[in-house]
Image (tube, rainbow, N blue to C red):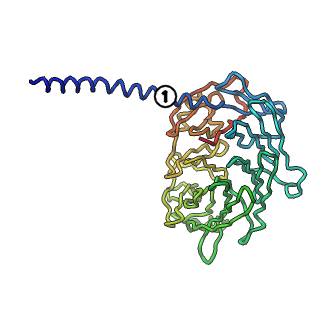
Amino acid sequence: MTMKQKAVIVLFVLLACALPVSFSIIKHYRVRNIERSIDELPIIIASNSGGSIHFTCLNREECVPPTESLGTPNNPGIDEETNLYLPFYDHSDIFYIDLKQQSVRHITTDPNPKLENFLSIYSLYTYGKVVLANFETVVIISKDSSYEVVQLETVDKFGSVSIGGLVQGRKDQVIAFSTLPIRKEGKDFARVFIIDLDSGAITEKLLPCPPFVEATQASLAGQKPGVRYGLTLVSVTAGLDKLYYTFLEDKDTGGGLQVQLGMFDTRSKQETYVYDSPNGCVPLTTRYRQHKEYLFVGPGRGPLLLRLKDLSPVVDFEALQRRGLGFGIQALSPFGEYFLVGTPTEAFVLSQDGDVLREYSLPVELFGESYTFVEYLND
């Protein structure tokens, strides 16, 4: 064996020994980066108690002082300037809490005759503004306390509007959609409303959707296997190229009508995926929400966490329940690139693939109490 051959063999052995060490170093730094990104923001729980909203921080020693309660928090979150915004169900007032100064600013829309009977159902923070909606009215609230009221019935051409949710649109736009499709010239269409967040201008669009039969008492009495009844729109992508909807179908298994969740490509006009629930249960609700590339429903009607691209499940919630001492899932919220999941006794930080990255025990005073996470929608 020549010296050159010996040198090659020695080099190969050294490289072979070095590779496991290199992978170990890479894995170590990856874990450290994940840990660091989780701890960049406080993980906060909001709960109602004694007429106040109380906050519990899971990764901080100090937290936000209690503040006045105006009702049940509706998707509270932290904005890109690290302010906590706090909308509430049933009305249009919100709080902005400066986490550094520990100061609270109350933004109210009273008195406004357009919002006299406004009951907030949906809430979304997008492009620096809080957007609230009920079935036909959208309120856009800016940080300077100014606001815009957008009434969709003023542009209605095809019957009454019933908003089914809010989705972040393209730059400085929000998308509202009607839960029920309309029929025009023998074809079914989904109705979406693109709202400019600065001007309040509305652009209505009709998108093709799958054919279905209306869920009337007569149609359901004569149900047939393979026929879709009562299609309800639950979400739409920002590019308007995908629709997500629930429907009732008799799969001829002897179980009667089952709720299904489908995905439709508006360009090819083809249904691309149907979510196959392992327990045969899909939430029949208008409380589906989007976060980045995910579609989810909170525990009140779910929980459910799916990938937008193919409706594949992200996490085994039953396994999480077992880790949480067997209790049910109580809270589910986005947190940057992660998700927060809570049981009555535990809280988990989940990766984009549903892996548990961090686990926290909840304070005893929260055991059995209703609560929600403060979410973070930015990267």
Q: Nearer the viewer, residue 142 or 356?
A: 142
Dot 1 alpha-carbon crowd within 10 angstroms: few under 14, some 14 to 19, many 20 or more: few
Residue 110 x %, y %:
88, 50
> Where does the image place residue 11, in percent across and percent down from the top left?
23, 25
Q: Nearer the viewer, residue 240 or 265?
A: 240
Report if residue 176 is visible in the image. Answer: yes
Identity of the residue furthest to the left in this view: 1
SS for tag 1? Answer: helix
Q: Which residue is mark 1?
A: 31
> Which quadrant holds residue 165?
bottom right
Q: Residue at x 62, y 46 (%)?
A: 297
Depth check: 162 or 30 in front? Answer: 30
- Could you tell me if residue 91 is visible in this image? no
Q: Which quadrant is the C terminus positioned in? A: top right
**Residue 157 placement (x, y as % from top left):** 72, 72
Residue 104 image-quadrant placement: top right
Q: Residue at x 49, y 48 (%)?
A: 312
Instruction: Identify the residue shown where x is 74% and y is 69%.
Output: 156
Residue furthest to the front: 4
Residue 25 vertical placement versus 241 (above, below): above
In the rendered structure, the answer to whether residue 282 lies left or right of residue 164 reads: left
- Left/right of residue 62 with respect to residue 187 in the rendered view: right
Total count of labels: 1
Q: Residue 331, image x and y in percent?
A: 65, 37
Q: Quadrant of the N terminus?
A: top left
- Determine whether, in the image, residue 109 is placed left or right of residue 26: right
**Within the image, what quadrant is residue 28 found in?**
top left
Q: Residue at x 71, y 71 (%)?
A: 158
Question: Eyeballing the image, is 52 above or below 188?
Answer: above
Type of amino acid under label 1: Val
Asked whether, in this view, residue 32 is left or right of residue 73, the answer is left
